[in-house]
């Protein structure tokens, strides 16, 4: 019971985060590609509760305007703009199903609600973070599912039937583990046509990362299957004339579930990192589509690295996601 | 008033010193001559510069983006090699980087024949190479023989071959040479700026052996690299630095009779990373910095108040960036989709609409943080002498762009996407070099701008060499963003881009006949201006070329980045210019105004 509660401590925040990025259009105040050309690298907008005279108000912000140096920004204190809920904004289709233009948060004109500042094009960093999370988190999730699927199928085949099937699959697994996968991915990207749609890029990333990583779970699952098929009750069932598919489905595969769950909790963050690495190197989804990797890629520039701390936000979220996933893996 | 008196005082003093110098100089010359070998001539007419008189001593450190690949001026191509070589060599006539006009160098004077085909050059007498050997007409003839020999395959040969015929070089006497061009060439003397004079006594053997291409490589002993520049090679440490020392035989003097250069040493350190350049300059490891990106310039500027360096924004240089469409003729089945799209690209209204939709001010603001100028002509405002000032920057107007598209038969479908006459959705990709973040930013801005016209644009960053391959050989691209510039400001330097047969005519390469009326007209105008000696008439012709380029938009011009440089506050005579090399072009005149505490 206690173990289950500890697992919940990890699962609930993860589920919340996935929900947040799935409904990014609603939670994000703006579209991820909307450029505010007068506000490049604007810092996070401070939210105020008290006006100049010290009177309490509902939360509000001031409009940001370029300061005297032309390099920074200051707040235009003459016009407070209230933050509002469920405001009308850019239209979108929620989950691809409903058309709506309501956003959770918004602010009166002419101010912009930039809770995490903007990037070099004046695009809202929070909106990009939420949309980018969709790519990064789900790439990890789907790639891990793919890896585990292949691993489970091949690993149980190898463990259950042994002999030449085992030999072929396991040598194959070793070959895959020895591959310098980063270079392989770099090479694979070079063969593709110049412009492919973001969805295609995403699926391609997922299938590449997922296919390359099947070997490790396959070896683990093979080990479990190998020991499971020699258990007394399995041998007994076999003695009563049970077929292979019955044995696998009823007795052997359930034994592997623990390994599969733990592997999933370990592989998902690993694959999120793989996607981030590829996008960081410019091999992931292309502009203006955000992902945590290409957002962090901005930090390759010295001036961004030294001057604009809010550009680190995807990295910060990544660290949190990693800690939660590893916590989950430990408790499983 | 006090200031005025002081100035007069200084001038008198300087004149006195100069007089003294001229009185004493022949004496020194005679003394020197007595121990020289027979046939040697002492430096009779050095070049007297007119900058502020400085003081000798000190070393200047600057960083290079990459290591030089060679020290051989015959084969050197890349900027790091050129930067080092140019400090060690000299040419007959040079282009003053500040005035952008020609001025005497190793040539004391020169005559141009009335048809502009023949140049007679009179050399300074008694000039010596950095090893003390005498320089005369034989070295000039030898140098040109090297550059012109097709077997040597020097990149400079292209400059000296005019209309498929090479320049003819003839020695008249020991200090006089005659050059004959196969065709009249306006501003022909500008050719000489890029051509370093070489020592025959050092390079003759390797030339005869046919090994001139590999001479003066990075392994060559420092002593063997001999030139006529202000500095000579002292030490080269691969992967680390290259140290040049003062050339004791340099042929320039200041007004008080001090032999230039002032600096004892010039050190190039190799720092591959742009950010590391800035950090090292901030830390005081380097004394001069050039090619600073706008972001880094702002970082330096923010800290300059408490640091001992000054920064200069020199305004737009000669570089112009542009968007262009693939107008090449392609064949093969796999290019069918490109050919379909080319029907839009060839439509002038389409190109005009794209140009009208682009927010150039936004590009300046976002990609260059305000440190760039929007362009009206492919000749930038940095080239004041040649720019057609009648042309104005295209103002941004989505309404104008939409009108143009509508008139050309484009429509918008229900999803507000632009479709052509045949109902095909307008969608194309822009390729840019993945190593250039500004161009990537420009592409992303244009992508957002064109989205307002209902166009779907993909931005595809690819590796630089692959990009060049696609554009120049395979013609496998739809649109691209690139930048040209950095060479001479004279219109002649632009022939390779403007002529329909030119190898930088990137939008449509490999034309044997001009494919459009306006390209034929540009060809005619460019060929006429080459033969026109009268500068006023030449300007008119080149203005028309710029107008034709602006009307027909083969290049949709974007912006010209400003040339941004910086130097320690104590460096005097710092006189940066927009032409290459922006900070070191007058290195012989630079000096430390006070001894640095080291």
Image (cartoon, helix red, strand yellow):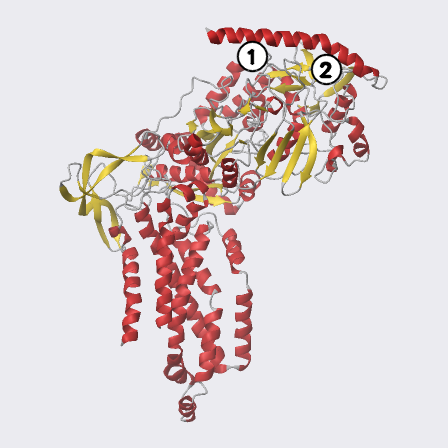
Q: Which mark is residue B124?
A: 2
Residue density around tag 2, few if under 14, some if 14–19, many if 20 or more, within 10 Å: many
- The answer to whether residue B185 shows anywhere in this view is no
- The answer to whether residue B80 shows anywhere in this view is yes
Mark closer to the chain start, 2 or 1: 2
Q: Position of residue B119 (x, y in %)?
A: 69, 14
The secondary element bearing badge 2 is classed as loop
Q: Relative to B488, say whether A298 is above or below.
A: below
Locate the C terminus of chain A and report the quarter of the image it occupies. Answer: bottom left
Chain of the residue that carries numbered disc 2 in the rendered image: B
The secondary element bearing badge 1 is classed as helix
Residue density around tag 1, few if under 14, some if 14–19, many if 20 or more, within 10 Å: few
Q: Residue at x 52, y 41 (%)?
A: B276
Q: Relative to B286, say whether A199 is above or below.
A: below
Q: Which residue is mark 1?
A: B535
Q: Residue at x 79, y 35 (%)?
A: B210
Q: Position of residue B202 (x, y in %)?
A: 79, 30
Q: Nearer the viewer, residue B588 or B169?
A: B588
* Rendering quarter of residue A111: top left
Q: Position of residue B388 (x, y in %)?
A: 47, 18
Q: Residue furthest right?
A: B38
* Rendering quarter of residue B218: top right
Q: Position of residue B151 (x, y in %)?
A: 75, 33
Chain of the residue that carries numbered disc 1 in the rendered image: B
């Amino acid at each position: 019971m206690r173990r289950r509660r500890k697992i919940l401590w990890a699962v609930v925040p993860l589920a919340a985060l996935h929900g947040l990025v799935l409904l990014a259009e609603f939670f994000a105040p703006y579209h991820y590609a909307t450029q505010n050309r007068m506000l490049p690298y604007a810092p996070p907008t401070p939210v105020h509760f008290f006006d100049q005279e010290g009177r309490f108000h509902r939360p509000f912000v001031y409009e940001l305007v370029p300061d005297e140096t032309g390099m920074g920004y200051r707040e235009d204190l003459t016009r407070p703009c209230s933050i509002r809920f469920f405001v009308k904004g850019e239209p979108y289709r929620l989950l691809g199903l409903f058309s709506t233009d309501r956003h959770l948060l918004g602010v009166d004109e002419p101010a912009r609600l930039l809770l995490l500042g903007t990037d070099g094009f004046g695009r809202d960093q929070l909106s990009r973070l939420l949309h980018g999370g969709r790519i990064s988190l789900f790439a990890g999730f789907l790639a891990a599912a793919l890896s585990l699927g292949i691993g489970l199928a091949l690993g149980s085949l190898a463990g259950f039937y042994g002999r030449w099937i085992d030999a072929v699959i396991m040598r194959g697994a070793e070959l895959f583990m020895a591959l310098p996968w980063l270079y392989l991915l770099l090479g694979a990207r070079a063969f593709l046509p110049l412009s492919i749609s973001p969805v295609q890029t995403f699926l391609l990333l997922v299938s590449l990362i997922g296919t390359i990583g099947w070997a490790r779970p396959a070896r683990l699952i093979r080990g479990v299957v190998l020991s499971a098929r020699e258990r007394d009750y399995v041998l007994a069932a076999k003695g009563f004339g049970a077929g292979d598919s019955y044995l696998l489905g009823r007795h052997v595969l359930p034994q592997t579930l623990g390994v599969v769950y733990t592997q999933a909790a370990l592989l998902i963050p690993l694959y999120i990192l793989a996607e981030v690495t590829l996008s960081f190197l410019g091999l992931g989804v292309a502009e203006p589509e955000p992902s945590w990797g290409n957002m962090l890629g901005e930090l390759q520039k010295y001036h961004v690295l030294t001057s604009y701390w809010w550009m680190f936000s995807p990295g910060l979220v990544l660290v949190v996601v990693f800690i939660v996933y590893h916590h989950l893996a430990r408790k499983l | 008033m006090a200031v005025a008196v002081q100035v007069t005082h200084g001038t008198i003093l300087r004149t006195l010193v100069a007089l003294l110098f001229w009185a004493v100089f022949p004496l020194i010359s005679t003394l020197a001559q007595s121990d020289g070998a027979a046939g040697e001539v002492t430096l009779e007419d050095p070049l007297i510069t007119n900058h502020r008189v400085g003081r000798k001593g000190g070393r200047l450190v600057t960083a290079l983006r990459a290591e030089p690949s060679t020290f051989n001026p015959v084969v050197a191509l890349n900027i790091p090699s050129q930067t080092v070589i140019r400090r060690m060599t000299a040419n007959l006539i040079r282009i003053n980087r500040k005035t952008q006009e020609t001025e005497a160098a190793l040539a004391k004077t020169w005559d141009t024949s009335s048809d502009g085909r023949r140049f007679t050059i009179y050399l300074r007498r008694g000039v010596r190479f950095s090893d003390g050997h005498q320089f005369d007409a034989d070295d000039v003839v030898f140098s040109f023989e090297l550059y012109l020999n097709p077997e040597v395959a020097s990149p400079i040969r292209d400059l000296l071959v005019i209309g498929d015929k090479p320049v003819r070089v003839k020695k008249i006497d020991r200090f006089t040479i005659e050059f004959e061009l196969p065709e009249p060439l306006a501003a022909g003397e500008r050719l000489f700026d890029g051509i370093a004079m070489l020592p025959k006594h050092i390079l003759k053997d390797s030339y005869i052996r046919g090994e001139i291409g590999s001479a003066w490589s990075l392994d060559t002993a420092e002593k063997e690299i001999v030139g006529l520049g202000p500095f000579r090679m002292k030490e080269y440490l691969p992967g680390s630095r290259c140290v040049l020392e003062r050339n004791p035989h340099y042929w320039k003097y200041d007004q008080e009779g001090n032999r230039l250069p002032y600096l004892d040493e010039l050190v190039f350190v190799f720092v591959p990373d742009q950010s590391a350049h800035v950090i090292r300059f901030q830390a005081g490891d380097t004394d001069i910095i050039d090619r600073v990106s706008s972001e880094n310039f702002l970082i330096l500027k923010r800290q300059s108040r408490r640091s001992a360096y000054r920064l200069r924004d020199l305004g737009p240089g000669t570089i112009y960036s542009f968007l262009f469409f693939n107008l090449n003729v392609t064949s093969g089945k796999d290019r069918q989709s490109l050919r379909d799209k080319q029907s839009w690209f060839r439509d002038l209204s389409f190109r005009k609409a794209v140009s009208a939709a682009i927010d150039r001010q936004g590009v300046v603001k976002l990609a260059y943080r305000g440190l760039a100028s929007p362009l009206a002509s492919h000749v930038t405002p940095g080239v004041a002498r040649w720019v057609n000032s009648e042309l104005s920057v295209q103002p941004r107007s989505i309404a104008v762009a939409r009108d143009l598209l509508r008139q050309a038969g484009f429509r918008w479908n229900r999803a507000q996407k632009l479709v052509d006459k045949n109902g095909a959705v307008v969608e194309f990709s822009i390729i840019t070099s993945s190593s250039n973040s500004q161009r990537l930013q420009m592409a992303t801005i244009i992508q957002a701008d064109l989205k307002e016209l209902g166009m779907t644009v993909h931005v595809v960053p690819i590796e630089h060499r692959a990009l060049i391959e696609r554009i120049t050989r395979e013609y496998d691209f739809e649109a691209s963003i690139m930048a040209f510039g950095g060479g001479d400001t004279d219109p002649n330097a632009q022939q390779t881009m403007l002529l329909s047969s030119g190898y930088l005519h990137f939008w449509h390469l490999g034309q044997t006949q001009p494919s459009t009326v306006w390209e034929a007209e540009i060809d005619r105008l460019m060929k006429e201006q080459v033969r026109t000696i009268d500068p006023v008439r030449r300007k008119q012709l080149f203005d028309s070329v710029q107008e034709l380029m602006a009307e027909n938009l083969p290049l949709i011009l974007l912006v010209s980045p400003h040339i941004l440089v910086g130097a320690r506050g104590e460096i005097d005579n710092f006189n940066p210019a927009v032409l290459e090399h922006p900070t070191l072009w007058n290195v012989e005149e630079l000096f430390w105004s006070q001894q640095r505490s080291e």
